[in-house]
Image (cartoon, rainbow, N blue to C red):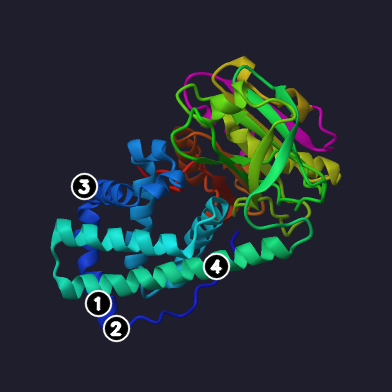
């Protein structure tokens, strides 16, 4: 599910050996090191508070994601191709944040200074880590440049912020509201791949800093508009603003669709598709199944949807009524994660068929339970496609 090919490493054998030898020490210092790094960086370069989601700093999700990426890279210097999918996912997310080359230099400076201050490994070790970080930054910068260029050159594409008008705002459930967005300039938009997300850049007097959020697109790809559906988080900043303040006719600043989680047609025309949606994790899957319906898909399709209460089963009735010849739907309501209960609705021979493709998304606990169950019944990782909200992490990791 990725298009990232990593060039052969340019690091010397000496650099690789030094980084490999010290990577376990850096990894062991994980939580303390990452907390110190982010405090140092956001104090020294407070302008980055306009880029980083500060809520993810408080719960350490963003610091841990970046730290895990650096340590993962350091332990795979001899096999960079193994990092291809991770690099692609990071590059796509960075493109949605409009990360610049200069910001990589800032991050690298504070990362190396933090390692030096907290671990004191010596100037020679810091120098070799600096070379390794520079190579990682260059890999990401080059991939992100290719993403930016490809998107800008595509029909309806662009680079940077583009103003969109809210053409329609509709409450879909007690906690979910949809927004249909059309470009202010009246020109075409770049159709997303079903499953990708849209980046919103929000500034408002009620917020001390610019806030950037990614919301999965729920519409069938087209050249006229985008549509997102946002879950309200009362303790958040952006979702209450969208729910309470933004009205039809208002303007939002948007970057093009990005993301490495999207629908891909199976090689066999008879292969089944299983979509597992946990709570608001349904949004990217909704774009996928709506697209399949428009295209007249005849392969077996299973839609499994979980929510904590009936009023939160957003779009369940619409999905059940889609004109898909071999569609089967199942919903589950309850306090626990619901993944295993939903999967019980799919025949085991379907789930274990080597051609069956499974797409799933939802809260962390839901992802973990789903992934664990898929592995237990023999679904191959290559046939399992997932997305997580916020900074990337693999299911089953803390």
- Closer to the eye: label 3 or 1: 3
Mark 3 or mark 4, earlier in chain = 3
Residue 348 sits inside the magenta stretch: yes
Instruction: Check contact, mark 2 vs mark 1: CB within 8 A.
Output: yes
Specify which label sits upstream in the sequence, 1 or 4: 1
* Other-residue count near label 4 (Cα within 10 Å), few / some / many at <14 / 14–19 / ≥20: many
Q: Earlier in the sequence, mark 2 or mark 3?
A: 2
Which residue: 39% across, 45% down?
Answer: 62
- Gap in Å between the C-alphas at discs 2 and 1? 6 Å
Residue 333 percent across, percent down from the top left: 57, 19
Along the line of sight, which residue is nearer the eye, 88 or 325? 88
In which quadrant of the rendered image does the N terminus lie?
bottom right
Q: Which residue is mark 1?
A: 17
Q: Nearer the viewer, residue 77 or 141?
A: 141
Mark 1, other Cα within 10 Å: few <14 / some 14–19 / many ≥20: few
Residue assigned mark 3: 32
The disc, 4 or 2, on the residue closer to the chain's N-terminal end is 2
Q: Nearer the viewer, mark 4 or mark 2?
A: 4
Residue holding disc 4: 143
């Amino acid at each position: 599910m990725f298009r990232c090919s990593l060039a052969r490493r340019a690091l010397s054998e000496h650099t690789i050996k030094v980084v490999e030898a010290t990577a376990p020490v850096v990894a062991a210092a994980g939580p303390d090191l990452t907390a110190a790094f982010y405090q140092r960086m956001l104090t020294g370069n407070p302008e980055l508070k306009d880029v980083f989601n500060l809520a993810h700093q408080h719960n350490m999700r963003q610091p841990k994601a970046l730290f895990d990426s650096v340590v993962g890279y350091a332990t795979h210097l001899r096999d960079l191709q193994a990092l291809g999918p991770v690099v692609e996912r990071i590059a796509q997310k960075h493109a949605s944040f409009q990360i610049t080359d200069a910001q990589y230099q800032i991050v690298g400076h504070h990362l190396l200074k933090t390692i030096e201050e907290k671990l004191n490994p010596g100037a020679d070790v810091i120098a070799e880590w600096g070379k390794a970080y520079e190579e990682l930054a260059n890999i990401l910068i080059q991939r992100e440049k290719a993403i930016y260029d490809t998107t800008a050159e595509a029909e309806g594409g662009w680079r940077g912020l583009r103003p969109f008008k809210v053409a329609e705002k509709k409450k879909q459930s007690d906690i979910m509201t949809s927004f249909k967005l059309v470009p202010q300039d009246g020109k075409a938009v770049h159709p997303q791949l079903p499953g990708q997300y849209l980046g919103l850049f929000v500034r408002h007097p009620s917020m001390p800093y610019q806030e950037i959020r990614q919301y999965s697109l729920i519409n069938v790809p087209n050249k006229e508009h985008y549509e997102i559906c946002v879950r309200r988080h009362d303790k958040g900043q952006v979702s209450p603003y969208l729910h309470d303040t933004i009205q039809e006719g208002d303007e939002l600043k948007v970057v093009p669709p990005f993301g490495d989680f999207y629908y891909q047609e199976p090689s066999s025309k008879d292969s089944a598709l299983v979509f597992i949606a946990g709570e608001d994790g349904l949004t990217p899957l909704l774009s996928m199944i709506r697209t399949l319906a428009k295209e007249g898909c005849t392969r077996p399709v299973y839609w499994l949807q979980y929510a904590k209460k009936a009023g939160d089963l957003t779009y369940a009735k619409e999905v059940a009524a889609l004109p898909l010849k071999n569609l089967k739907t199942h919903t589950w309501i309850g306090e626990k994660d619901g993944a295993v209960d939903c999967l019980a609705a799919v025949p085991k021979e379907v789930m274990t068929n080597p051609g069956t493709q499974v797409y799933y998304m939802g809260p962390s606990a839901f992802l973990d339970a789903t992934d664990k169950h898929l592995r237990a019944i023999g679904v191959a990782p290559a046939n399992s496609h997932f997305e997580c909200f916020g900074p990337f992490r693999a299911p089953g990791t803390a």
